[in-house]
Amino acid sequence: MPIRKLVIIGLDAADRQLTEGFMADGDMPRLRSIKDDRGFSALRSSIPPQTAPAWTSITTGVNPGSHGIYYFYNFSSSPLTITNATDSSTPRIWDYVGSLGGRSVMVNVPVTYPAREVRGAMVSGIPPWFLDERSVYPGSLLPRLREAGYEIDTPLGRGLESQPDLMVSRMMATEERRVELFLSLLRQDDWSFGMVVLTALDRLQHKAVGVGEKGAEAVRRAYREVDGLVGKVIDSLGGGVNFLVVSDHGYNERPLAFYPNAWLHEHGLLKRRSSVPNRLTRFAHDLFDGHLLWLPQALTKRYQGGTTTIHAIDAVDLEGSRAYVPGTDGVMVVKSKRDEAAIVSGLSELRDDQGKPFCKVYPRDQVYRGERLASAPALLIVLRDDINIRTDPYSRQVLSRSGTFPRGNHSQTGILLAAGPDVGRFGDLDLSLEDVAPTALALMRIKPPGTMEGRVVEEMLREPLQDGALAAPVAPAKGAGYAFSPEEEKTVMENLKRLGYA
């Protein structure tokens, strides 16, 4: 039985509520036609709803406790190190396809650097944000990408944020080049599986959600143009291909800011660094960032991306603190088991000015399961949908509406749509990220292995998977271990800060 062709189109941070609204308004006609013809479902994200664990769960079919990717940082190392593909040996969709002789093409899937040897081609996604010989497989792709001006992300800055139309135009130019590369690689390969992840919606929403009418219109335009790129991929590949359109999480407005590191400092659990150097650095970014847009972009990239909040985590003494929150999605490092109960109790008792609780805190074993549980962050903070996390330990208020901080963040609910000859009609289902990989394999007529924790979404299949389906052997993903150099770690960390993850 031959492998059926399948393509996953990833839309990072495509939000369920926004997508439904834009489809109803006529801004996303291609996704609306897919919904009307086959179906549309919400897709529950990971905890936290964050890029690195979410896309890894989508491509492996297991939760972070099994695949071991929890965030952009490795929490089992001290000091923290940046996550890369070799931190997980869990097989991905393309490993199963390759074990059966099929070929795959992947472009911009997060946490695939360094690119492993695959049957086919791979252009890795974040992290990092630079291109080198480890970014691609085979290595012969690198000169081609450089010649084409391929970018992993569009450089952004505060000056650009004040020009939302220009910001969207630059982002979509990057995405159009990405789609062109993906399609050209498919045309040159006898492929069975393809996957491309478009990140413009995530990057734009981090900059534009909650900042007024211009920001809202920029978000609408970006969703509309991403819809066009989805249509381009589908139209270019013909009617014999099955498609899954998925997002790793959603995005929503959050007008309040919660400062857990300030709370930890108040309770003697966190040690701060001097704020003077951080304030000076912050001032320098504010002075230069985005005010040189009249110069060629190649010259201004180094200034683009800084904001008044990107250096907040630098004010935390990570080594000297007993507990701290390193990023904006709710993971907490706690170095002593004795402190965990007090932190859970103290944070859970916090109330807003109306007396309402605004967060829940869970030990890792209440969120994750699997053999990699010991490498998980100790505690997970789950906030109300109107509250954002900021890492600045110098805030005078634990919860605040004032100050400079992004007015939106990742939400728990993404999207899933499906199209193609083997997809039947389905409704809004209770689906998790772990369900994507086994369903993708089933659509290719490959029997998912028992090691996958997600289920085959049988409601989506035109015909049930037959007993004679191809059975892929289970084997760890290939590739030697890798660690970023100190210089690379610094570069990646700066980019994480620019995106608001620190």
Image: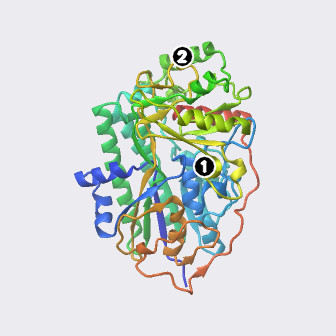
Q: Earlier in the sequence, mark 2 or mark 1?
A: 1
User: Could you give the CA–CA distance between mark 2 and mark 1, rounded to whole angstroms?
Assistant: 35 Å
Which one is in front, 283 or 64?
Answer: 64
Which one is in front, 486 or 271?
Answer: 271
Does the image show residue 502?
Answer: no
- Identify the element where label 1 is drawn: helix
**How packed is label 2: few (under 14 Cα within 10 Å), some, or many (20 or more)?**
some
- Tag 2: amino acid: Ala
Q: In this figure, which colouring scheme has been used for the structure?
A: rainbow
Expressed as whole percent of the image width and height from the top left, the position of residue 491 reads: 64, 33
Does the image show residue 216?
Answer: yes
- Tag 1: amino acid: Pro
In the rendered structure, the answer to whether residue 268 lies left or right of residue 150 reads: right
Q: Find the residue positioned furthest to the left.
A: 25
In the rendered structure, the answer to whether residue 123 lies left or right of residue 178 reads: right
2 vs 1, front mark: 2
Residue that appears at 46% across and 31% down: 351
Residue that appears at 69% across and 24% down: 317
Q: Is residue 245 above or below residue 502?
A: below
Quadrant assignment, res 36: bottom left
Which one is in front, 358 or 476?
Answer: 358
The residue beneath circle 1 is 143
Q: Is residue 108 above or below residue 322?
A: below
The residue beneath circle 2 is 284
Residue that appears at 54% across and 47% down: 51
Expressed as whole percent of the image width and height from the top left, the position of residue 125 reads: 57, 49
Q: Quadrant of the C terminus?
A: top right
Residue that appears at 41% across and 67% down: 237
Quadrant assignment, res 320: top right
Expressed as whole percent of the image width and height from the top left, the position of residue 47 reads: 54, 49
